[in-house]
Amino acid sequence: MDLALLRTFVTVHRAGSFTRAAALLGLSQPAVTSQIRTLERQLGRPLFLRQARGVTPTTVGDELAQRAAPHLDALVEIAESGWYEESVVRTLHLAGPPEFTSLRALPALTSLVPQGLALRASFGNAEETLEGLAAGHHDLAIATARPRGRLLSATPLCDEEHVLVAGVRWASRVAPGALRRGGPGVLEHIPVVEVHESLPLVSRYWAAVFDTKPAAAGTVIAPDLRAVLETVTAGAGLAVLPRYLCEGALERGELVALLDPPVPPLRTYFLAVRTGTLALPHIARAQEWLLRAAVDWC
């Protein structure tokens, strides 16, 4: 049986689509279709059920993938075994949210640069980074949503705590205990600073802590949490920020935490990878390094 046909088959099985598999393999969609038909003729059994959007493996297809994929991944690992030679440099393409990737992931991975790792970073939201990973544009993706399907697999990386904060001037206008007694209505006079018009962080916090939706619209919208931090610190209003990002400002007294709920809202980050690519040593090493570093981030 031709190994090239098996490689194409496993890629289609993981991608759930001839078109997506073609992009990952660097082939045309008709070429992928032809290779799968050739393999099906050789086996005398259908491997996929064609649907309007993608393909679904048959029982035979699932069985073949289960048997073939580990061996193909092992062959890739053997082919890439020279990664640790000093003369070989491998490039890791990492995608994730701009703040977390900049302040957490990239500094952690710089320890691998002397070992022959080059880094390329891309920023985007969870949907963008996972789509890019699935399309083969990235090697690892950090996202706040767990991917679905067989093509991508994900491991929880860490949880970030969200904190409701305001500048000192605005915080002084909220009487001690007023928010706990009166609910979020006591904050309606304070401008809201957020990363998007939909108020994703504020809405999540309001739902988790107050069991309601925010009444106010955003006053300042800046699509980077670091900009939100600086704007609130300068006195623009209130915001919900990850603790790791605003802890320094809280300790210096530049920001005030408006509430300390018994169970603070958390958001989980996932480290996602295309199934099978951990056979590549530089990707596996980077994943291992990030998971190890994340122990101190939680």
Image (cartoon, helix red, strand yellow):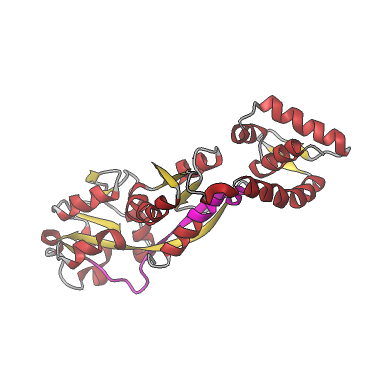
Identify the residue at horizontal 44%, vertical 48% (top origin): 117
Q: Quadrant of the N terminus?
A: top right
Q: Quadrant of the C terminus?
A: bottom left
Occupied quadrant, residue 32 = top right
Q: Is residue 212 above or below residue 2?
A: below
Q: Is residue 62 magenta?
A: no
Task: Look at the image and tell me whether residue 203 can be seen.
Answer: yes
On the image, the x and y values in percent for residue 221 come to 26, 44
Identify the residue at horizontal 52%, vertical 42% (top origin): 133
Looking at this rendering, what residue extends furthest in the right direction? 44
Residue in the foreground of this view, choosing between 7 and 52:
7
Q: Number of numbered discs present?
A: 0
With 128 as the anchor, is 153 left or right in this view?
Answer: right
Identify the residue at horizontal 23%, vertical 53% (top origin): 229
Residue range in magenta is: 258-286
Residue in the foreground of this view, choosing between 146 and 90:
90
On the image, the x and y values in percent for residue 283 come to 52, 50
Identify the residue at horizontal 67%, vertical 41% (top origin): 11
With 241 as the anchor, is 10 left or right in this view?
Answer: right
Task: Look at the image and tell me whether residue 149 can be seen.
Answer: no
Q: Is residue 285 magenta?
A: yes
On the image, the x and y values in percent for residue 89 come to 47, 43
Q: Is residue 32 above or below residue 103?
A: above
On the image, the x and y values in percent for residue 281 come to 55, 51
Occupied quadrant, residue 189 = bottom left
With 142 as the anchor, is 52 left or right in this view?
Answer: right
